[in-house]
Amino acid sequence: MIRNSESDVLIKDLYVENAQLLKALEKTEQRQKVAEKKNFLLEEKISSLNKIVRDLGPSPLTPAPYHFTRS
């Protein structure tokens, strides 16, 4: 009888621990989803900023004219 009680307590503890682990896993998955979304948005911003920089500046392959004058 005592062994059954001990087993019941252990089983109950395992169920409680499992429920806590499932909640922790759910929170972790939600955080990961948010992080992935933020990462995607940051990559989009980087891409847009790189395009703006390319459009603003001269191409690095085209040398700027250089005028040498002697004094």
Image: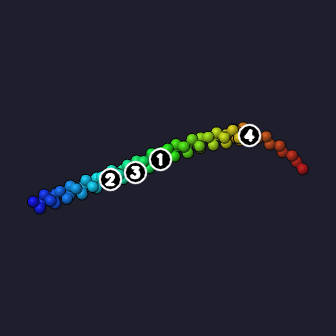
Kind of residue at disc 2: Leu
The answer to whether residue 57 is above or below residue 23 is above
Kind of residue at disc 1: Val
- Tell which of 66 and 55 is nearer to you: 55
Q: Quadrant of the N terminus?
A: bottom left
Mark 4 secondary-structure assignment: loop
Residue at 57% from the left image edge and 41% from the top image edge = 44
Q: CA distance from mark 2 to mark 1?
A: 20 Å
Q: Residue under circle 3?
A: 27
Q: Which numbered disc flags the more N-terminal residue, 2 or 1?
A: 2
- Tell which of 62 and 2 is nearer to you: 2
Numbered tag placed on residue 63 in the rendering: 4
Q: Which numbered disc flags the more N-terminal residue, 3 or 1?
A: 3
- Tell which of 53 and 14 is nearer to you: 14
Q: Residue under circle 2?
A: 21
Q: Which numbered disc flags the more N-terminal residue, 4 or 3?
A: 3
Q: CA distance from mark 2 to mark 3?
A: 10 Å
Mark 3 secondary-structure assignment: helix
Q: Quadrant of residue 9?
A: bottom left
- Coloring basis for residues: rainbow
